[in-house]
Amino acid sequence: MSDIAIIGESSFLYQKLFAEAGVSYQFVSPDLLGSPFLPRFKVVIIPTGFANSLYSKALAALQRTCSHIADFVRNGGILTVFGPMVAEHRYDWLPMPLEYVCELGSQSIGPSRHECTCLLCTNTPECDGYLIPGQGLETVLEDGKGRAVLVAGKLGEGLIVATSVHEFPAPEYIRWAAGRAKAAKF
């Protein structure tokens, strides 16, 4: 069993990040989502661009497996979702309401005490937009205009972390998530 599943194609940059964090990982093709043969994972990462057909084929698979996603989180997994890289997106496949608006730029981020803020490597990250969280999701970090760029919500024993930060997660976040989460079926 790998600690982390990355939904998408293999990337040398991700491989380097996970090696530095000291966790096991597996790239999972979107076509395999929902398969009864997938192993359990502690963390599932959906990289930037998942809804943009120029970068990824993940969106249709995520929509098809929305009940699996909810079960994964309820059973203790941590789902980490980055920006979709489309003009606007409604995360209708998540078990909590969330919307996204694309707006590229550097942001100045204020402090937060939430445990998942270790996702950021800097206080001035590049963001590809902002988030509009619905019921169940808490704004963890805001941009200079008071708009959410990192949100989190507990569901059952797990956690959904969504961000519009357009950077790789910090190794500290990878270690934190893998250490906090329980292995669950996706």
Image (cartoon, rainbow, N blue to C red):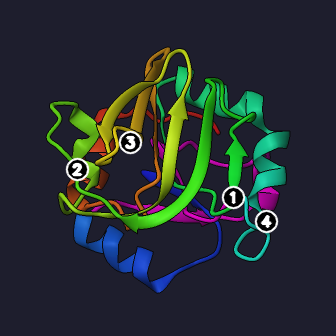
Tag 1 residue: 87
Nearer-N-terminus badge (4/3): 4
Specify start and end residues of the magenta stretch as a single range. 22-50
For marks 4 and 2, give the one nearer the viewer: 2
Tag 3 residue: 150
Whole-angstrom CA distance, mark 4 to mark 2, is: 31 Å
Tag 2 near tag 1, CB within 8 Å:
no
Q: Secondary structure at mark 1?
A: loop
The type of residue carrying mark 1 is Ala
Tag 2 residue: 109
Q: Residue at x 66, y 34 (%)?
A: 69
Tag 4 residue: 57
Q: Residue at x 41, y 39 (%)?
A: 148
For marks 4 and 3, give the one nearer the viewer: 3
| Residue 156 locus on image (x, y percent) | 50, 14
Tag 4 near tag 3, CB within 8 Å:
no
Whole-angstrom CA distance, mark 4 to mark 3, is: 24 Å
Nearer-N-terminus badge (2/1): 1
| Residue 21 locus on image (x, y percent) | 25, 64
Whole-angstrom CA distance, mark 1 to mark 4, is: 17 Å
Check if residue 109 falls in the magenta segment.
no
Q: Residue at x 14, y 40 (%)?
A: 111
Whole-angstrom CA distance, mark 3 to mark 1, is: 18 Å
The crowding category of the residue bearing disc 3, from other C-alpha atoms within 10 Å (few below 14, some 14 to 19, many at least 20), is many
The crowding category of the residue bearing disc 1, from other C-alpha atoms within 10 Å (few below 14, some 14 to 19, many at least 20), is few
